[in-house]
Amino acid sequence: MRPALLLLIAAVAWGQEAEIRNPHTTPADVAAGAKIFRSHCAECHGAKGEGGRGPNLTTGVFFHGSSDADLFNNISNGIAGTAMPSLFFPPDGVWQVVAYVRSLAQGGGEQRPSGDAARGAALFREKGCLGCHLVRGEGGIKGPDLSVIGSQRNLEHLRRAIVDPNAEVPRQYWVAKITLESGSSYTGFVMNEDTHTVQILDFTQGLKSLSKQSFRKFDIDKSSLMPSYEEQLSDREINDLVAYLWSLKRESHAHEGRSE
Amino acid sequence: MKSSRLALSAVLAASSVYGQLTFERLLKADSEPQNWLTYSGSYRGWRYSKLDQINRQNVKNLKVAWVYQMPTTHRIEATPLVVDGVMYVSEPPSNVVALDPATGRQFWRYKRSLPSKVNVCCDQVNRGVAVLGDRVFVGTVDAHLVALNARTGAVLWDAEVADYRSGYSITVAPLVVKDMVITGIAGGEFGIRGFLDAYDARTGQRRWRFWTIPGPGEKGNETWSGDDWKHGGGPTWVTGAYDPAQNLIIWGTGNPSPDWNGDVRRGDNLFTDCAIAVDADTGVLKWYHQFVPHDVHDWDAVQVPVLVDSEWRGRQRKLVYWAHRSGLYEVLDRETGEFLFGKPFAKVTWMSGLDEKGRPIRNPGVDPSEEGVYVWPGVQGATNWYSPSYSPQTGLFYLTVWENKGFYQKGEADYKPGNLFIGSVPKIDVEEDPGYGAIRALNPKTGDKVWEYKVHTKPWSGVLSTAGKLVFGASGGWINRDEREESESSFYALDAESGKELWRINLGGNMSANPITYSVNGKQMVTMAAGSGIFTFALP
C-alpha cells in the first residue's frame, strides 16, 4: 500500500476535519469512472446509477456519508453490514468512480423552476394536498411523503405527477379491496403479503393482518388515488406548485450517516 | 423433570464428543439417522432421513426446542452436521460453532480472522463444514481451507486454496472422501479459473486439482477463444456427491465468466455449467455432461447431484438426477455420463427441446442485448443452489422452484483481477411480474409434476424428506417492489405424497438454507436456519 493512501485512510478513519478532496475530477476522469462503474457497479446501482438492488446514486445524498472521503472509503472498502462489496482498484480508479458518481447528481445542470414557491406553498394548503401527503411532519397517509421531494425528483417529474398522476403509480400506492367471507371489507394499501396472510393499512381501520383463508374477494386497483389537476389549476398555479415542491430539499449534513 | 433431562443430555453430549467419525461410517451415513454426517446427509445427495418419529399424524404438534442466535449480519446458508452428540455449524462469514444438539448450548466457537477486503458476489456466506475423525473442516471467504480440532475448535492446519485478492472465495461445504477433504471454489462473478481440489485431511497438503476450465493442450480448451479460459469462471460452489462403487466424485460447475456477455468467450466454454465426474484418488476426469453450452444467463449447474440406482427403461442402471438453474430436469447414466432424459420443470423460453445427446436447442433472440430481453427463467434460475431431496419411500424427487422471468441486458466486461467481471446489469425481480415460488414433487422417471405447494414469494431454501412421509421446506424469500420489501418467512412440513401442508411456523428473517433432521436421546429434532438464528424443533 502506498504511503499516500495510508494517510488518506487514516484521515478517513479518524474523521479529521481537514477536508479531503477528490484529486481526479476532469471530464476524462469522469469518463474513466463511468467505464469502471458500468462494469463493476451497475449490476446493483443501475446502468446510470438510478438504483436497483443497490440505492439510487443520483440524488446527491448518500446514506453512508456524502463527503469525497466517505465515498472513497465506501467504494474502496465496501460497507460493512450491507451488500456493498469493496473494489479492488488502485486509488486513482476509485477517485474516478467518485468523480462519476458525483456527476450523476448534477444531472447536467439542473433547471430552476419558473413559478413562485411561496404562492405554491399556499396553494398546496388551499387545495387540500395535505389531506393525503405528508410534508415535514404534517399531513395524511394516502400519498407519498413529499418532505424532501425536491431532492428526489426533477421538475418534469413533479409536473407530470400533478397533471397525470396515473403515469406512474408505485406499487405501494395500489389500493387493495378485500371482502371477507363474513362480509366485512377493507380498503387500503398492502403493507406486506405472504402465502397465507396480507398485512393491510386500511384507510379507516388502520393496520390489520388478515388470513387469506377468510377472503371472498381480493382485488387490486392500480390507478392513482390522486385526481389529475390539469383542468383544475391554471398553468401559472401548476408552475407555482412545482416550484414549491422543488424547494422541498433535503438538508445536507457534512458527515451524514456517520453516526459513530 | 424437563430441566433434569436437559442437564443429563448435555452431559451425554459432552462425553460422546470423543467418538471418531470414520470414512466407513460416512459410506453408511444413512444407517445412523440419529446423526447428520455430510452436507446432504449421505454421499448420494438425497437429503433424506430414515427417522419417522415425527410423521404425518403428529407433525402438527411440532414446537421450538431451542434457538441459537449468531452474532452476524450475513445470511446463514449453512447445513449443520450432527456427529455423536455435537452439532457443528458454520457461522458466516467463516466461523464455526459446536453446539449441544439437545439444548443449543455452545461448546466452542472458531472465529476466523479475515482481511478487510474480501470479494464475494452474493454476501459473505458459508454452507457448512465437513467432519472426519476428530477434525472439522471449513472453507473461508478468503479462500483458505482450515482444519479444526472437533473438541476445542483449535486450528490444526490452514491451507491457502487460492488467492482471494484475485476474486476467489470459498462458500461451499467441503466433502470428506477417504482421507481427503474435497473443496470447491467460488468466484464466477470475478473471472476466476475454477477448480475442484482434494487435500490430505491429516496434513492439509493438496493431493490433486481438477481445473474446470482446461488450459492449452487439455481437452476442452478448444471451446474457448484465445486466452479467455484464464478468466473463464466455472466455479464449484455447492457440495457434490460421491459414488464409492466407481470411486467417482460427481460435482456441478457454475457459470462461465463474464456471466452475461458471451462475446469475449466464443465457444461452448467447457467445463462450465456441467456435471463432472472425477476419479476420487487422482482428480482425473472420467466423464462430463454440459447442461448449458455457452451460457450467457448465469445459469450455474452447481446443484446437488442425486445418485439413484434404479431400473431405467427395462434395465437396471446407475443414475444421476439433476434439476438445474436453467429450468431443466435431467437424468444421466453415472457410469458413462450418457444423457438419458431431460425436460423443463418450470417455464423456460430459451430452448425448445434437447437433441439426443442432451444438447439444448436454443431459441433465437434470447441472448442478453443492450436493449435487454425478457427470458424465462430469470437470473436466479428456476431453481438454484439450495438442495433438492429424493425419498426412496415415495420414489419422488422434491425441489424448490421459481416460476419467473428475467430481464437480461448485455453490458461491458472489463477484466481487472479481484473485481466483478460480469458484463451486465441483470434485473432479478421484474417488478410488474415478479413470479412466484413452489415446492414441487417430480416423478424422477418422467420429470412430470406430481404435486405443487405454491408460495407467494420465491424461496431460497432447500428441502428435506423423511421416512415420516414428510417434506420440510421454507419460504424465506422476499420481493423487492419499488422501495418496499414483501417478505415471507415460513418453515413448513408437507405430506410427501400429496404436498398438503401439515404444519407451519413463521420464524421471521431471511431463510436461505437447507433443513436437516437428527435424533438426540431418542428424540427426533428438525433444524433450520432463519434470520441470524439456528432453530430446532421437536415434539413436546
Image: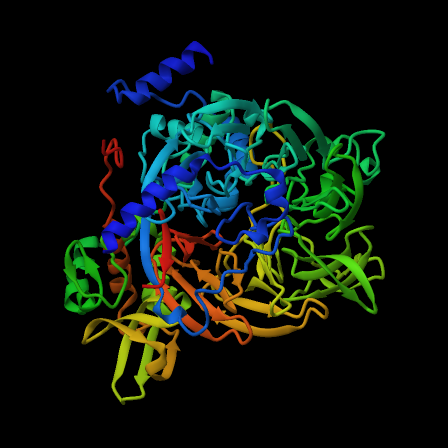
- Asked if B53 appears above or below A188 in the picture, the reply is above
Image vertical order of residue B143 relative to residue B293, above or below: above
Percent x, y of residue B167: 57, 31
Above or below residue B137? Residue B444 is: below
Rendering coords of residue A107 (x, y %):
41, 43
Q: Specify the quadrant of the image occupied by residue B333.
A: bottom right
Evaluate whether residue A103 shows in this view.
no
Residue A141 visible in this rendered orientation of the protein: yes
Q: Nearer the viewer, residue B312 or B178?
A: B178
- Taking the image as shown, residue A152 lies to the left or right of residue B398, namely left
Image coordinates for residue B47, horizontal then vertical, percent? 56, 55
Give coordinates of residue B115: x percent, y percent.
45, 24
* Left or right of B265 on screen, residue A237: left
The residue depicted at 53 percent of the width and 62 percent of the height is: B465
**Residue B63 image-quadrant placement:** bottom left
> At 57% across and 23% down in the image, what residue appears?
B160
The answer to which quarter of the image holds residue A208 is: bottom left
Report whether A117 appears left or right of A81. left
